[in-house]
Amino acid sequence: MIKHLFFLIPTLFLIACGAEKPEDTETTSKTPSEEAVPPSESSLSLSHFFMPDNSVAHFKGEGNEYASYTLTTLYPFENFVTTYEDNGGTVMQRIYHITDDKISLIAENGEAYEPTTHSLAELQAKQEIEVYLASPLEVGATFNGWKITSVSETLETDSQTFDHVIVIEKTNEDSSITRKYFAKNFGEIKREFIMQEGDEQFIVSSVFESME
């Protein structure tokens, strides 16, 4: 059971394979290019917040043995993105739909050891589970319980430094905090789960390390 603790967002400690939580908001799509650009630029689109097509990204984890993982990203159709997150204990498949002002999670399947394919019609028929990211990408904007707290963070990783990082934060029912960090043309490059335990903080994090 422990192997599932760090897979699901927002709590990172939930392994249900399809928690349903409809929301609202809509972007176009295309595979990412390369350099971080300030979110204020008009060229910024939500379609830039995923890893490149057919890429495999490696994340370094701390605080939990399953916090490290590899992320395979595929673009089966325009405006649809499929990811496979493998933490060494299990594999989570997630499918996203990008529309004009939001990215919607439309499928989430655990134990996805074998890649699966869907027709365009099947993907278009799927209902939104929750909103993954939404515009406007401005400090103070909120969606689905998340709040954008920064659009100009600098994040140093073992492989490179990311500028103009967007940070979103959510306070969970148990008062724990989940944060996600997004960089243009890479997508989610860090996630954190923070829980106060007496005078100390318990922190589980995954940070981008490299990409193939």
Image (spheres, rainbow, N blue to C red):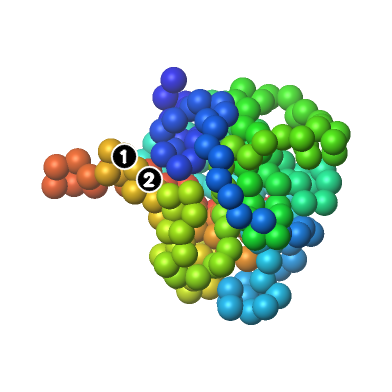
Which mark identifies residue 173? 1
Secondary element at tag 1:
loop
Left or right side of 44 for 147: left
Q: Would you say residue 203 is visible in this rendering?
A: no
Q: Is residue 64 left or right of residue 115?
A: left
In front: mark 2 or mark 1? 1
Label whose residue precedes the other's in the sequence (2 or 1) = 1
Q: Position of residue 126 (x, y in %)?
A: 72, 35
Q: Quadrant of residue 204?
A: top left
Left or right relative to 180: residue 204? left
Q: Residue at x 63, y 40 (%)?
A: 128
Q: In the rendered view, would you say 196 is above or below 110? A: below
Tell me the quarter of the image containing the N terminus.
top left
| Image-quadrant location for residue 84 | top right
In-front residue for pair 8/144: 144
- Crowding at label 1, few (<14), some or many (≥20) Cα neighbours within 10 Å? few
In the rendered view, would you say 66 is above or below 111?
below
Identify the residue position indicated by label 2 in the image: 193
